[in-house]
Image (spheres, grey):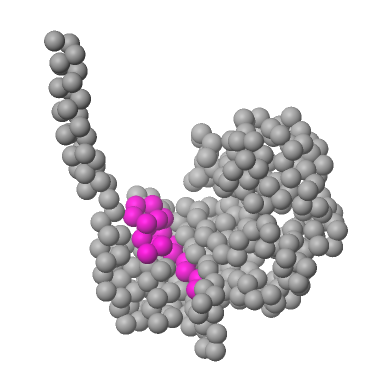
Amino acid sequence: MKKLNQTRIIRILRIIMPIVGIITAVIFVPWNAVFLWVSPLPDTVQEELDNAVELGFDGVIVYVDQAGETPAFYAAGLHNRDEQVPADPQALFKIASISKLYIAAATTMLVNDGTLSLDGTLADYLPDMVGRIENADRITLRMMLQHRSGIPNFVDQPGYPWFETLPDRNAYLEFALDEPADFEPDARYNYSNTGYLLIGNILDNALGYSHHQYITEEILQPLGLTDTYSLLEQVESREIASGYHFGIDEDLLELDHISPGGSMVATAEDVGIFLRALNDGSLLNEDEQAIYSSIYEYEHTGWVPGYQSIARYDADTDTVVVLFASSTGGDTEALIHIIYNRVKRIATR
C-alpha cells in the first residue's frame, strides 16, 4: 500500500510540476520586455527612445557613430525629474563598469613598456594581500583582468550597501577580504569588481601616482576627451544626468562609487570616441593591441543604482552605439538590452 501511494504521488507530481512551472513563468515574466521584443521597429531612433520613456525609463541618451556619417545624438525623457529638465544628449553620466575598459587599456600600456607583467602575482604586486585574499601567490594580473582569479566580488557579499557612499577603496575591499575563494585561480570565469579594484591599486603602486592621472594623460588627452572624468567629485553635479531606481523616489545623483573599474563619469560621445579608438587600433599600437586582445573585451555594460549603460562596436557595419538610461530596477534591466538592439538595428538598416 505504501509503495502504491508513493507511485501515485509521483504520477500526480509529474502532472502538477509542469503546470506550476508554466504558471510561475506567466506570473514572473517581464511582459513589457516580451511585447517590446516582438513589436515592429519604429522609423527612427528618436521614436524608439520616446517609447522607452513610455515603458518607464526616466531618461535615455544615445550616441551613434557610423563610418562615413556625421555622429548622431538622441535623448528622451528627463535630465532631472524634480526640475523637469529635458534629457540632454551631451549630459555627463555615471558609466560604472564601462570604466574597466579604460583600466584594461592602461594596464596594457604598462605591460607593454615593461612596468608590469601579466604573469606577476597579486602577492608580488600587493604583498599585504597575502593571507587576506586566498591564493594571492597564484593569482596573476592576467587572471584578474580576465575575471578568472576566483577573488570574491565585493558587491555579491552579504550586506553590501548598494545605496550608500563608502568612504574609500578599503571600505569596498573589506567585503572581499578573508573570504574563501570562489574557485581555484584560472579554473573558470566569474565577474569580480574586487579584481579591478586591486588592479587599480597595483597601477597606483607601479606608477607612484594615481592611475586616474595616467588614464587622463595617456588615454583621454591624446583622444581629445574633455568630457570624461575619473571620479564624480571632479564634476559639477548639475551637468550629470539624474538617476532613479524603481521604488525609490530619491535622486541617486550624489551616490558616489569610487572603486576603480566603476567610478568614471563621461558623455555618451566621449565613450563612443574612446570605444572606436580602442577597436580601430588608433588608441593602442600594434604590440599593445596584441596584448589587449589577449586579456579583455572590446565592449562593456555598466550598472550602478540609477544608471545603466551599454557601449558596443559593430564591426559588420563599422558602427559604435552608446546607450545611457537613467533608471534601474523593475523591468529596466531586461528592457535596456532589447532597446539597445532595436536602436542599433534602426541606426544601421
Q: Residue at x 18, y 21 (%)?
A: 7
Q: Is residue 186 left or right of residue 31?
A: right
Q: Position of residue 36 (x, y in %)?
A: 29, 65
> Is residue 42 inside the magenta stretch?
no
Number of dots carrying numbers: 0
Q: Is residue 67 left or right of residue 61?
A: right
Q: Residue at x 19, y 29 (%)?
A: 13
> Is residue 329 inside the magenta stretch?
yes
Q: Is residue 184 left or right of residue 322?
A: right
Q: Residue at x 55, y 85 (%)?
A: 67
Q: Position of residue 55 (x, y in %)?
A: 30, 64
* Front in this rendered view, residue 260 or 137: 137
Q: Quadrant of residue 282?
A: bottom right
Q: Position of residue 319 (x, y in %)?
A: 52, 78
Q: Quadrant of residue 139?
A: top right
Q: Is 72 drawn above or below residue 82 in the view shown?
A: below
Q: Residue at x 17, y 11 (%)?
A: 2
